[in-house]
Image (tube, grey):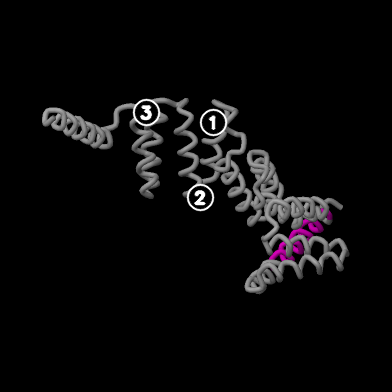
Amino acid sequence: MRRVSWLLLSLILFSVCAESTLAQNPRSAKDFFKRGLSRFKKGDLDGALADYDKALELNPAFIEVHLNRGKALSVKGDFDGAIADYEKAIELKPSIAYNNRDIMQAYAGRGFMRSNQMDLDGAIADYDKAIKFYPTDAEAHSKRGRALLIKGDLDGAISDFDTSITLDPRNPLTYAERGLARLHQGNEIEAQKDFDTSVRLNAELKLFVDLHIMDLEMQIKEMKRRNNAIQYRVA
């Protein structure tokens, strides 16, 4: 019985030592990938990315590394880099694109940045891809609706807001945004219903929602000003 116990103890110690040595001196793409995962879980993004880079140097077609490096880059805010990794992973294995929330979030993240920079066409293109990869995400629909609203496509915006509300009927912000779109259509009665629903869902957020709507109004006016300036130059 003692021999069996010592044997088990020896095997456990050997396994622990081997794992520790592997973490300190990875040799294969798989070793670097595992250490990268461990570092990512600990919040060491730079260390994880360095390990993922090394893993891909050894095996450029390592799909899991592309996916996880994309996730780490997305967390850092490097959406271009994340999307490049995701696109490579999809190229290697197209089936991973189906209902992939990580890929959706990278495109939606870049779309949000582009929208804030008033690059609405670029933002909408990114939201199109985000929704393609994860069609049931309410926020992606609401963000695309917001970009369409600023651009002046009121019907498209309302369609996206409708979908977003169907997917998540408890978000007061989406009702307020749809209310604004309806107000610009001249449909004041339905607009007021949306504004009332927004307040009813969360009255504590009313000030935040009001400020958000004011900001959207400013962006709509700015987009109209830019479009008028372009038409003036063409004329």
- Give coordinates of residue 221: x percent, y percent: 76, 64
CA–CA distance between discs 3 and 2?
Answer: 25 Å
| Rendered-image quadrant of the N terminus | top left
- Magenta-colored segment: predominant secondary structure: helix
- Give coordinates of residue 108: x percent, y percent: 61, 48
Q: Which residues make up the magenta segment?
A: 215-231
List the single residue furthest toward the left: 2
The tag earlier along the polypeptide, 2 or 1, is 2
The tag earlier along the polypeptide, 3 or 1, is 3
Q: Which label belongs to residue 77?
A: 2
Task: Please state if 55 lies on the left or on the right of 118 as rendered.
Answer: left
Secondary structure of the residue carrying tag 3 is helix
Q: Which label belongs to residue 88?
A: 1
The tag earlier along the polypeptide, 3 or 2, is 3
Task: Please state if 231 lies on the left or on the right of 13 as rendered.
Answer: right
Judging by the rendered image, the residue that carries numbered circle 3 is 29
For the residue carrying disc 3, how many other residues have a C-alpha within 10 Å: few (<14), some (14-19), or many (20+)? Answer: many
Which of the two marks, 3 or 2, is nearer to us in this view? 3
Q: Which residue is painted at 74% across and 54% down in the image?
A: 161
Front position in the image: 151 or 232? 151
Q: Quadrant of residue 130?
A: top right
- Give coordinates of residue 165: x percent, y percent: 72, 55
Secondary structure of the residue carrying tag 2 is loop
For the residue carrying disc 2, how many other residues have a C-alpha within 10 Å: few (<14), some (14-19), or many (20+)? Answer: some
- Give coordinates of residue 61: x percent, y percent: 47, 25
Q: For the residue marked with disc 1, what is the amino acid?
A: Lys
